[in-house]
Amino acid sequence: MINRIVKMSFQPEHVETFLEIFEASKGKIRNFEGCYHLELLNDTTSPNRFFTFSKWESEDHLEIYRHSELFLTTWAATKILFNDKPEAWSTVVASSA
């Protein structure tokens, strides 16, 4: 299982546009083969900073998604709204409580 965290910061005037894009895409992403979970988090100190947190069956499933038409079109519409370079991490659980 791969956990994927993506940090995105938007121009304040484009936050609503991003939220509309996410709302239109989230069901398709959640139903993409290998995706077990997707949620959108909003930074408590910066209202124009968001994180997506997703869980994928494997790195291969994530890579297939990242090369899919769904990702490419969603990312193209999203990246023009950024006010800073996005950051992404793939993680695995090292220990659980």
Image (cartoon, grey):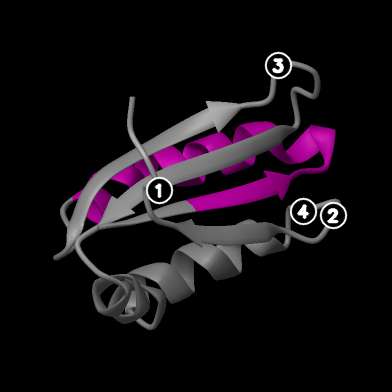
Q: Amino acid at mark 1?
A: Ala
Give how far across and how far down residue 12 sits, in percent: 82, 33
The answer to whether marks 2 and 3 mark residues whose Cβ atoms lie closer than 8 Å is no
Secondary structure, mark 1, is: loop
* Residues rendered magenta in the picture: 5-30
Q: Earlier in the sequence, mark 2 or mark 3?
A: 3
The label nearer to you, 2 versus 4, is: 2
In percent of the image, x 26 and y 42: which residue is there? 37
Q: Amino acid at mark 2?
A: Asp
Q: Amino acid at mark 3?
A: Thr
Secondary structure, mark 2, is: loop
Label 4 to label 1: alpha-carbon separation: 31 Å
The label nearer to you, 2 versus 3, is: 3
In percent of the image, x 71 and y 16: which residue is there? 44
The answer to whether residue 72 is left or right of residue 51 is left
**Does residue 94 sit above or below 75 in this rendering?**
above
Give how far across and how far down residue 52 sits, in percent: 50, 43
The C terminus lies in quadrant: top left
- Residue linked to disc 4: 82
The label nearer to you, 3 versus 1, is: 1
The N terminus lies in quadrant: bottom left
The answer to whether marks 2 and 4 mark residues whose Cβ atoms lie closer than 8 Å is yes
Q: Quadrant of residue 63?
A: bottom left
In percent of the image, x 54 and y 66: which residue is there? 75
The label nearer to you, 4 versus 3, is: 3
Secondary structure, mark 3, is: loop
Q: Which mark is residue 84?
A: 2
10 Å crowding of disc 2: few (<14), some (14-19), many (20+)? few
- Residue linked to disc 3: 44
